[in-house]
Amino acid sequence: MRAFKARHFMEMAVQVMKDSIAEPRKDGKASPKVGAVLLNLDDEFRGERICTACRGELRQGDHAEYTLLERKNRDRKLDTCVLFATLEPCAPGARKPPKTSCAERIVSARIKKVWVGIEDPDPTVDRKGIKYLQDNGVEVVMFDRDLQEAILEENKDFIAQAEERAAAAERALEPVVLSQLESPIDHPSLDAFSTDALQLYRQASKLDEDVSSAEFRQRLRLQDLLMREGDKLIPTGFGLLLFGKEPRTALPQAGLLATIHYPDGTEETKDFDGPIVDIPRLAIEWLEGKMPNVIDRSTAIRGQRNDPFYTLIREGIVNALVHRDYDIRGAKCQLIVTKDVISILSPGGPVPPITVEQLQSFNAPMLSRNPVLHYVFAKIGLAEERGLGLKSMRQAATEAELPLPKYSWNAPYLVLSLFPNRSSSTAILPADVLAKLSDSERTGWQWLSTRGKAKSLDYAKAMGVDTRTARRHLSRFSELGLVRLTGAARATEYEVL
């Protein structure tokens, strides 16, 4: 198999995408711009190694993958090929019968690896094409973050419409399922919903329908928050999580457990077990009255509700609630507060193929575990545009000159650690490591932890030391396993581990 640079073909797919031909529509719906690249890696292959296609290239409305696989390469063996597509291939059930989905075509072609640009923006089909590929042995890799943002920008009109539009009424006989919570819950009826939580959603989304109206309930049904059983509408698991008065009665894994460990050795606990759309606000309000008793406010950032540090906590709580694995029934989201660290625990690892290392870079590709939840949180202003919460956390920490948040994996939890002040970055170091740092090195480490990485000249300037001293400090950090070197010569940077 030939070696290749994936980035080059991601960029090629983005360029091809821009040639997409929109089909004329009387209903005003925007057509997506989609580009696809097929690369043959067989050393013995004699034909053209690279083939491209865009939406509508040969016929109005034809998907790029269909054009590439069926119109241009129908009679070729493709099991030595890899595919790059700027939009998630549609999943079984997304197209009206007898049309075959693009994901099914890819599997049938025996293509074993696919790079995907962005998820399908319709929240009711989002990530189901990706999961179908993964379930059928296809390795999926997401495009680099900057290219994803370029794709989003080119498709902003289509995405805005798609996120407002419910899924098509027709579904596959065996639809792709991301979570058990897409199904109806056995016992609760519509009375299980909190009217206040529904009103929050209606008002924030600027909807005209009354929450008790048939039109509003139809909206929830099309968003997979209600399902019809016979002549009744019953909440799905996701509907109950979002709006249920007491979701834990049917879903014991719902909610957030909070614990504060005070410096005097006492602790205080609080369970947030109502509608999850209300949990971030309630948790922040509870913390605001407690935090001054936990951390030293003279060394922490100052302010009240608009503190960047509370922005960090809010984003962390939202991410934990929206992106956790709710099929893990024996674990709950947790918020643990100590003097030096605020930890937010979310059951389940990152959504494959995203890694903890990518999350820690704050530049991970965008991918949702629970698109239905993310859509509702975005509509009420608690989640930013697709996947941009990571950037908000980095920006908030940098603006407040706080140590950058840290992601780690402690099975079964993805752990986000937030640091309320600069001194936290040294307070959490192991005692034997801390003992090996001088006072000036500790100060330098506190500064470096707010940056994530820096060159020796930047460190020297910030610390007011000469370059020789800066290199000595940075070398000590490297010896102790606190940083790693990236780049070479003048481009060398010291990156916090």
Image (cartoon, rainbow, N blue to C red):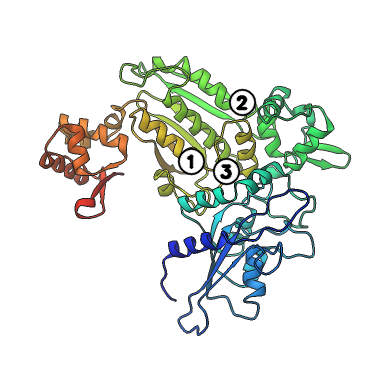
Q: Residue at x 84, y 33 (%)?
A: 214
Q: Is residue 203 above or below residue 358?
A: above
Amino acid type shown at disc 3: Asp
Left/right of residue 484 with respect to residue 177 in the rendered view: left
- Quadrant placement of the C terminus: top left
Residue at the disc numbered 1 = 413
Q: Residue at x 70, y 22 (%)?
A: 196
Number of dots carrying numbers:
3
Quick one: label 1, few (<14), some, or many (20+) residues within 10 Å? many
Spatial CA span between label 1 and label 2 = 22 Å
The dot on residue 325 is 3
- Across and down, in percent, residue 167 comes to 73, 48
Residue at the disc numbered 2 = 278
Left/right of residue 208 with respect to residue 434 in the rendered view: right
Quick one: label 3, few (<14), some, or many (20+) residues within 10 Å? many
Q: Is residue 455 above or below residue 86?
A: above
Q: Nearer the viewer, residue 434 or 296?
A: 296
Q: Earlier in the sequence, mark 2 or mark 3?
A: 2
